[in-house]
Image: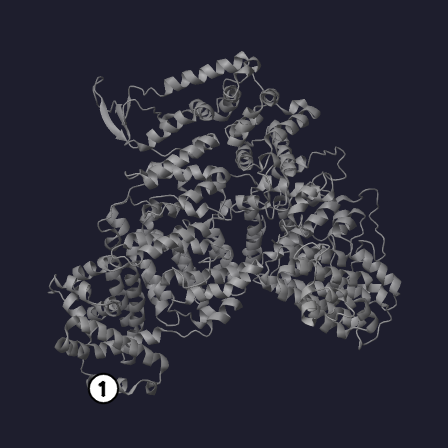
């Protein structure tokens, strides 16, 4: 198996590349410190559990024999040490009186996840934590936070087995656990917050739990803990007794609690009980949520003293505050019981129950959210779908699994008659899911056969893939291989092709695949016209010779022949009898009445017989039924009252959902075609559009027979028609729809979980409409015409932009800003829109798109609004703005360094805890820098780290400056980063004077001089810039380079090309490379310094322009998706032709880190390898001009590197003793080697397929067999 290298965002060096290395990295080594730095960052920023599972190993004590974990890169010892570091860090922050309860909650969630999955040895953790506290400051343990943390995991099976397996270990471990208890006898009576109550009583709760393992530990329990245990029991007995003024509606003898009247002390006590009496507390919650409500007996106004008034008060969902303090064990148990009640129970769940379930999953994303998601996806009942509309949006990294399950539901019910509501719910959910996935996904694992998607979902999938590929690239090599089969699957059953205006924005990979497709709309129109002409004669003939059964068979055959004729356009290919058969009816084409209109007339005339509905359903056939709505449209002729809407509704209800969708798409094609015909007859366009809008209003709002979202999607997919988008805008502007939107927005909140109130009830008919409700009477939680429009509005905006209607797009966004607040992925919508249409959006529309966001939650730079409001549309912000943007990434995204700055004399070896506090207390470039928010408080990127990174990308994409201006500013900052920080930030650093040496090896302004250099201190304001980071100048310079590379990798390819051009210019303009008077030895020495790693160079202040640029490129490359690595060759093409050994070395240094990453992508690996050979040939070629007096031995290290790269690719990983190169690679090397001088070829002779000169070829199994 091949093991992929793990890169943490911002790292240009892999942590490790093979499973075996995870356990073999020596403690204290550079690799060990690098791994711990990554882990500490992960514990602060909470990445997805999918990331954790990919990089972790199971602790040896929990690991079954002879098991392996492919791809794991962190050993249990690393995890344990990082978790201990984080615990100590949080204790220090807590002791500084900083409010960090939310940070403890987040850490407990991850800690529970790691412990439950066996990634931490429990005993080892207790021992190391005890040792750290004993060796360090004893005063660090001033509260019971550690006790509370351990109480969360004490019920985990692995922990319980560990404690009960060895009585001796149990006693020793118990002593250490109890040593963490801190009984505070001087509690402030006024401090009755739930957290204070929990921490005060938690030691008693934990002790009782440990006592249940072994009663012999009684001697270690003090009386205070026993007394607190009695207080908890007494409070519980009193709490479950309902006061006289309340009477709970429930079964006799049930434990219950009035959760609406809990004060802070009661909430804290209930939190404590959740750790010891999880069964009883779980029953109390379930009884509350299952009850019909609470009957209150109150004294009303103007009543006699003894009179009472009885009223029913509906149960409220549990608040987020209450849920956040419950033990994770209780939350898990409660989630299971709620799932059974909601998805498997016979009774319809209450709104309070569903809302509580949603909130419960949101408070612990690692322990509850994703694990329960897997179980939730296994429920296939239709009732599950409507709940998922709220749930799926926060399942970061799990949308693919849910999409596959919903697709199965869709494929099951799309052909069933009458399953419209469940189908529309599932289809709308699937649309949201697909548009939320910003990664490659496979619709079928075997990549064979058409998808189970509907026509609508197929079209949405293409759009989603186009957005993802264009804005984020194709991440993996495998995805590039799967893309072509995936597109073939999606389009196998689709009848659609996109307009040229839409296709011009598609990425090349998708556009090249779709460019040859034939638009089948014309064929559908021709089929509509010919079926209309020929059907009557067929009906007459069949009625004479065999009745309706033969009529269906023969007409179906006839339709197939017509479609074949239309497709081939060559009539002489048909047998003679077919030609005669068709010609025999040519005389009646103009007189025949269409069967479709004839049937529609019988079905839809105002005086139609109601019994004809069943006749139509039982005897019509699919080829005609797909034209039902089109026929109704033609009969209406702008007068909706002229048809029998009752019969039409009855037929639509009994059709399958797929047939209704087909009717909508066909109707849209027919009406647009009819508009063109009427225009040719001289009718005014405005009258035709008014008639079309009137007909649509009848279908959508008057009788609610057809779903608006599918009609809008069908119209915008025909944007090549000049009137399609005009109809869409008129529909969106209709007062009936605007009223629905206002009702939807005023009856709920975008973040419903944050409000402790009941949802306003909406009448079923108003929420669902006739077509979707019918006899189904499920609660209308998330099923509304406005809700179904949420994923559609962004697509309408995309079509308007593609058709250069940016002013109308601005107006639509302005009208629907309130609704877009409910868009589950509005942050991603803003980011993707700006990236997808970069360079094509006017500033006015960019501002409107930004207003879609909840700006109070977005960490924009403080100066960003003023640059967006600047009247000068081409102004580029100063370098100070970009420097502060990078500083925000250093403080919030890039993993913090292990130790404090060298200038800090305290030298805390346990980690850089001081900097973590500094980032939250000092002003930074980020206006909202509180990185530790609850999971549900972050917007859709997932974690705060992702939010900060994506926000920086949004800022860059929104600026009026061009890509070249932005890249030039960022590159200039990186070129001058170290001397600027040293000279302007801290003056004198580490005993060196600010007058840096002027040799090419120094980091002076002179050594970095280029033709466009600016003042290196232009963007630094005295000492404030360095002080904001908490790092030394040397450390900060390296982190700024990492941050810049990471940021540029998030931007579209337009920025990448500018980076390659600017980087090549700076390298070529460096004075000591172009100075022809320099000797080869001087140049070689200068290159050695220039290519020194930026981390090492910064320590001695020897950074150079080329060194910083190369480091920037490496940081940039490490974060690029695979597809975008194709363009990395551009920088070498800018540098060629190479005329010196120094430039050869620079080219190799730039491209060398890519070769191991490309080892699994042979075509790109071969292109890169060939490029490096060609660079060598520029200097060491047979016909190099001018000739360079350099010996082959001068580049022996580069030749060794080429040998190693070839062997690495052949092995598919680190080179082993038995590694063999691939024959294709040897063949390539043999061809390009012919460009080199004989003395250089001699050193590369083993990279040939000539068995007489190459030991690789002589011992290669394939070549040996061929020669034999």
Q: Secondary structure at mark 1?
A: helix
Q: To which quarter of the image does residue 250 belong? A: top left
Q: Nearer the viewer, residue 1131 or 984?
A: 1131
Residue 988 appears left or right of 567: right
Is disc 1 surrounded by few (<14), some (14 to 19) or many (20+) residues within 10 Å?
Answer: few
Q: Residue at x 24, y 70 (%)?
A: 624
Residue 893 in percent (x, y) is at: 61, 46
What residue is pinned by disc 1? 586
Residue 549 appears left or right of 1100: left
Residue 804 in percent (x, y) is at: 45, 68
Residue 1244 appears left or right of 662: right
Q: Residue at x 80, y 43 (%)?
A: 989
Q: Nearer the viewer, residue 798 or 1265?
A: 1265
Q: Is residue 70 above or below residue 297?
A: below
Q: Nearer the viewer, residue 1096 or 169?
A: 169
Residue 892 in percent (x, y) is at: 61, 44
Q: Is residue 883 above or below residue 583?
A: above
Q: Residue at x 76, y 53 (%)?
A: 1093
Q: Nearer the viewer, residue 47 or 683?
A: 47
**So how many labels did they put on this image?**
1
Quadrant the C terminus occupies? bottom right
Residue 1228 in percent (x, y) is at: 69, 70
**Which residue ends up furthest to the front in the rendered image?**
1268
Residue 1232 appears left or right of 163: right
Scheme of colours in the image: one colour
Is residue 758 at least partly visible in the picture? no
Q: Is residue 185 above or below residue 254?
A: above
Is residue 377 at least partly visible in the picture? yes
């Amino acid at each position: 198996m091949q093991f992929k290298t793990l890169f943490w965002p911002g790292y240009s060096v892999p942590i490790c590349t093979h499973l075996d290395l995870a356990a073999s990295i020596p403690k204290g080594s550079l690799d060990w410190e690098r791994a711990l730095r990554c882990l500490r960052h992960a514990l602060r920023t909470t990445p997805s559990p999918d990331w954790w599972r990919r990089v972790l190993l199971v602790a040896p004590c929990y690991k079954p024999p002879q098991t392996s974990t492919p791809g794991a890169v962190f050993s249990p010892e690393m995890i344990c040490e990082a978790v201990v570091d984080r615990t100590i860090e949080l204790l220090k922050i807590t002791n500084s009186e900083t409010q960090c309860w939310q940070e403890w909650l987040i850490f407990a969630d991850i800690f529970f996840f790691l412990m439950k999955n066996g990634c931490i040895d429990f005993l080892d953790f207790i021992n190391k934590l005890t040792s750290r506290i004993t060796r360090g400051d004893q005063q660090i343990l001033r509260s019971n936070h550690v006790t509370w943390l351990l109480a969360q995991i004490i019920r985990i099976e692995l922990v319980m087995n560990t404690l009960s397996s060895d009585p001796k270990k149990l006693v020793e471990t118990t002593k250490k656990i109890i040593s963490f208890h801190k009984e505070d006898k001087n509690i402030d009576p006024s401090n009755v917050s739930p957290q204070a109550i929990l921490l005060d009583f938690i030691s008693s709760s934990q002790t009782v739990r440990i006592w249940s393992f072994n009663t012999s530990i009684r001697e270690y329990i003090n009386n205070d803990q026993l007394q607190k245990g009695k207080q908890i029991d007494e409070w519980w007995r009193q709490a479950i007794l309902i006061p006289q003024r309340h009477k709970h509606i429930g079964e006799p003898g049930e434990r219950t609690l009035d959760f609406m009247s809990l004060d802070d002390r009661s909430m804290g006590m209930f939190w404590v009980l959740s750790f010891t009496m999880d069964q009883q507390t779980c029953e109390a919650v379930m009884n509350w949520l299952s009850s019909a409500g609470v009957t209150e007996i109150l004294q009303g106004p103007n009543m006699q003293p003894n009179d009472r008034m009885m009223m029913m008060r509906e149960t409220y969902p549990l608040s987020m505050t209450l849920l956040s303090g419950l033990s994770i064990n209780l939350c898990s148990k409660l989630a299971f019981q709620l799932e059974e009640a909601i998805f498997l129970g016979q009774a319809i769940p209450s709104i309070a129950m569903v809302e509580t379930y949603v909130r419960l999953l949101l408070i612990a994303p690692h322990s509850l959210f994703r694990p329960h998601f897997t179980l939730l996806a296994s429920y296939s009942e239709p009732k599950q779908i409507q709940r998922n509309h709220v749930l799926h949006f926060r399942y970061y990294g799990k949308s693919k699994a849910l999409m596959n399950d919903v697709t199965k539901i869709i494929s099951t019910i799309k052909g069933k008659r009458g399953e419209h509501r469940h189908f529309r719910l599932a289809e709308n959910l699937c649309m949201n899911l697909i548009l939320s996935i910003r990664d490659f996904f496979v619709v079928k694992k075997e990549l064979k056969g058409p998808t189970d998607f509907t026509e609508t979902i197929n079209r949405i999938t293409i759009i989603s893939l186009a957005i993802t590929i264009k804005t984020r690239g194709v991440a993996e090599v495998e995805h590039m291989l799967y893309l072509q089969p995936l597109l073939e699957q999606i389009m196998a059953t689709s009848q659609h092709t996109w307009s040229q205006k839409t296709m011009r924005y598609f990425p090349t990979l998708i556009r090249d695949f779709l460019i040859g497709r034939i638009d089948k709309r014309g064929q559908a129109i021709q089929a509509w016209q010919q079926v209309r002409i020929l059907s009557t004669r067929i009906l007459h003939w069949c009625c004479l010779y065999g009745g309706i059964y033969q009529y269906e068979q023969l007409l179906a055959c006839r339709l197939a022949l017509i479609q074949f004729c239309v497709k081939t356009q060559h009539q002489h290919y048909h047998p003679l009898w077919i030609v005669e058969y068709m010609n025999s009816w040519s005389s009646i084409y103009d007189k025949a009445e269409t069967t479709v209109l004839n049937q529609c007339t019988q079905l839809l005339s105002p005086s139609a017989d109601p019994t004809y509905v069943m006749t139509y359903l039982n005897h019509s056939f699919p080829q005609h039924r797909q034209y039902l709505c089109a026929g109704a449209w033609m009969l209406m002729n702008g007068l909706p009252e002229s048809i029998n809407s009752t019969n039409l509704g009855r037929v639509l209800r009994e059709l399958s959902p797929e047939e209704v969708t087909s009717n909508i798409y066909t109707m849209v094609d027919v009406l647009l075609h009819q508009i063109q015909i009427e225009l040719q007859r001289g009718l005014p366009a405005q009258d035709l559009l008014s008639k079309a809008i009137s007909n649509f209003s009848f279908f959508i709002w008057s009788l609610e027979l057809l779903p608006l979202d599918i009609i809008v999607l069908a119209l915008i997919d025909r944007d090549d028609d000049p009137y399609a988008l005009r109809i869409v805008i008129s529909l969106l502007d209709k007062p009936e729809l605007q009223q629905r939107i206002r009702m939807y927005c005023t009856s709920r909140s975008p973040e419903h979980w944050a409000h402790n109130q009941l949802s306003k009830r909406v009448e079923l008919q108003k929420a669902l409409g006739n077509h979707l409700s019918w006899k189904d009477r499920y609660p209308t939680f998330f099923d509304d015409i406005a809700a179904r429009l949420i994923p559609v509005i962004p697509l309408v905006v995309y079509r308007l932009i593609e058709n250069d209607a940016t002013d109308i797009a601005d107006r639509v966004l302005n009208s629907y800003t309130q609704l877009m607040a409910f868009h589950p992925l509005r942050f991603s919508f803003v980011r993707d829109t700006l990236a997808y249409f970069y360079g094509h959006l006017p500033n006015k529309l960019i501002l409107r798109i930004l207003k879609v966001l909840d700006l109070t939650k977005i960490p924009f730079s403080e100066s960003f609004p003023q640059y967006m409001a600047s009247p000068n549309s081409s102004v580029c912000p100063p370098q100070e703005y970009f420097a502060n943007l990078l500083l925000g990434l250093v403080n919030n995204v890039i993993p913090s360094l292990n130790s404090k700055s060298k200038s800090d004399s305290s030298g805390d070896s346990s980690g850089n805890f001081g900097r973590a506090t500094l980032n939250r207390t000092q002003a930074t470039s980020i206006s909202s820098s509180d990185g530790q928010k609850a999971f549900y408080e972050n917007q859709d990127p997932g974690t705060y780290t992702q939010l900060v990174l994506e926000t920086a990308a949004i800022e860059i994409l929104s600026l009026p400056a061009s890509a070249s201006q932005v890249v030039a500013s960022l590159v200039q900052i990186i070129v001058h980063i170290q001397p600027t920080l040293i000279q302007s930030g801290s003056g004198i650093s580490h005993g060196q004077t600010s007058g840096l040496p002027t040799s090419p090896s120094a980091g002076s302004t002179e050594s970095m001089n280029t033709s466009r250099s600016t003042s290196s201190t232009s963007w630094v304001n005295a000492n404030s810039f360095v002080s904001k980071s908490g790092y030394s100048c040397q450390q900060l310079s390296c982190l700024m380079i990492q941050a810049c590379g990471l940021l540029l990798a998030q931007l579209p390819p337009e920025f990448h090309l500018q980076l390659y051009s600017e980087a090549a210019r700076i390298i070529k303009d460096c004075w000591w490379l172009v100075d022809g008077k320099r000797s080869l030895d001087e140049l070689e020495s200068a290159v050695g310094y220039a290519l020194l790693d930026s981390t090492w160079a910064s320590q001695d202040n020897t950074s150079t322009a080329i060194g910083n640029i190369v480091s920037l490129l490496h940081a940039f490359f490490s974060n690029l998706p695979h597809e975008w690595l194709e363009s990395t060759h551009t920088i070498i093409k800018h540098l060629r032709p190479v005329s010196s050994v120094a430039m050869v070395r620079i080219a190799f240094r730039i491209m060398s880190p890519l070769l191991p990453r490309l080892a699994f992508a042979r075509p790109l690996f071969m292109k890169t390898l060939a490029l490096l050979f060609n660079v060598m040939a520029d200097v060491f070629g047979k016909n190099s001009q001018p000739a360079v007096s350099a010996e082959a031995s001068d580049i022996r290290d580069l030749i060794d590197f080429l040998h190693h790269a070839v062997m690495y690719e052949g092995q598919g990983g680190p080179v082993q003793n038995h590694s063999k190169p691939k024959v294709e690679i040897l063949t390539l090397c043999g061809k390009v080697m012919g460009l080199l001088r004989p003395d250089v070829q001699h050193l590369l002779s083993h990279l040939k397929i000539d068995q007489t000169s190459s030991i690789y070829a002589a011992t290669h199994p394939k070549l040996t067999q061929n020669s034999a």
